[in-house]
Image: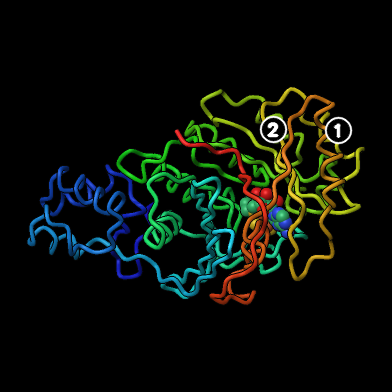
Amino acid sequence: MIVQAPDGKFPVRGMLRQELVEVLAGLGETEDRVRRLQTHVFKHRMDSFIGMEDISARSKDRMARVLDLDLPAVDARAMAEDGTRKYRVKFRDGSLIECISMAYNGRRTLCLSTQAGCRMGCTFCATGAMGFARNLTAAEIVDQALVMLRDQPADRFNVVLMGMGEPLNNPEQLARALTILVSPWGMDRGPRTVTVSTIGLLPALDELAALRLGVNLSLSVTAAREDLRQMLMPATRAWPLAQVFESIRRYPPEAFRSYIYSYVMFAGVNDQLTHARELAAALDGLPGYVNLIPMNPTPASQYLPSSDETVSAFRNELFRLGRAAHPRYSKGRTIWAACGQLAGAALPMDTTTGAADGDAEAEVGASDS
Ligand code: SAH
Ligand code: SF4
């Protein structure tokens, strides 16, 4: 469904090519005009008709009456010395979300939010602690990438749907946003450069797989034992890991390009060798590798991050059992921009430069096409 602006206008960045063609056909505009418009919006990153020199003034006038090209406002921005930038974006209704631009080995990774807040209530996550405000529209998801690219231009970049919210709790707008991100007429990112992170909501995950977009899937596992996982991530009670894995086993190769199992590590809670063995056993026969992420501090959380030695021992145990695993250290911790630290207005935001986080490893396995 296209979510129209309050004034009834159609959001260009939330529409598929054919939808735009149909809307504009009623105004007598041709498909070629639509092609030019989408090139300006997605490739030239324009947010107004001014400057679209290959479209006549009369056409622009007509289109301006029905189309919305505005980008949301950046409410605040914070920069860390490791190159991470966090943007607090304010939508027209006043909703605040955060999105992050990170530099990994010279390549930018844009981390987008799919909801204002989150209703999944994971006990270690700042977004979960703030509760749920609303779903974002596809245009609002794509707009975040444009806002960051206008601030820091980049031709080649990866996209991770790993900001605020549970993407599969907003499946329809997620699928629309992903289609716009990967389509040649849209943001034109190769599917392998796009990663969706989820706690594994069924049947929404099955429905996403059925679209065969070929993006990467990052499944937030964080504990292989169901009772421990449900304690840490209460919403997973409805969708046990065993069922999610059963689904993944059935997906055709075109469903997702690669599978990443993310495992946030809490000292003394889920970081012992027995947990590594449980994880290796649960993943038996499944494709993909594990990302080990020592938890990032959040104001409400009672947990502490696992030590480097513990992470390393855990990884070695997984290796011994035949499962590749990589420790990942989140970027942007000094500006509260790391995984699990996004809380909209609930955390302080200034524009000062924090101290550097000393690593340069990608958090996810996405690579460019
Ligand atoms: N809701 C989705 C995507 C957003 S959260 C999901 O949970 O997958 C993105 C990632 O941040 C998830 O893998 C989640 O487990 C992780 N995360 C949440 N809180 C964290 C914290 N305090 N420290 C480290 N990672 C955290
Ligand atoms: Fe929501 Fe993901 Fe945070 Fe859980 S970890 S509360 S699903 S954003």
Query: Are there few (<14), some (14-19), or many (20+) residues within 10 Å of tag 2?
Result: some
Left or right of 218: which side holds 54?
Answer: left
Q: Amino acid at mark 1?
A: Glu
Residue 203 rendering spot, x and y as whole percentages: 61, 39
Residue at the image point whose x is 58% and y is 42% from the top: 204
Residue at the image point whose x is 62% and y is 65% from the top: 132
Residue 339 rendering spot, x and y as whole percentages: 66, 56
- Residue 289 marker: 2
| Image depth: mark 1 or mark 2 in front | 1
Q: Amino acid at mark 2?
A: Tyr
Camera-side residue of 15 and 155: 155
Count of all numbered marks drawn on residues in the image = 2
- Residue 55 marker: none
Vertical side of 199 occupied by 284: above or below = above
Query: Are there few (<14), some (14-19), or many (20+) residues within 10 Å of tag 1?
Result: many
Residue 288 appears in which quarter of the rendering? Answer: top right
Residue 169 rendering spot, x and y as whole percentages: 59, 52
Q: If the picture is divided into quarters, which one holds ligand 2?
A: bottom right
Q: Are marks 1 and 2 in contact (CB under 8 Å)?
A: no
First in sequence: mark 1 vs mark 2: 2
Circle 2 SS class: strand
Camera-side residue of 52 and 165: 52
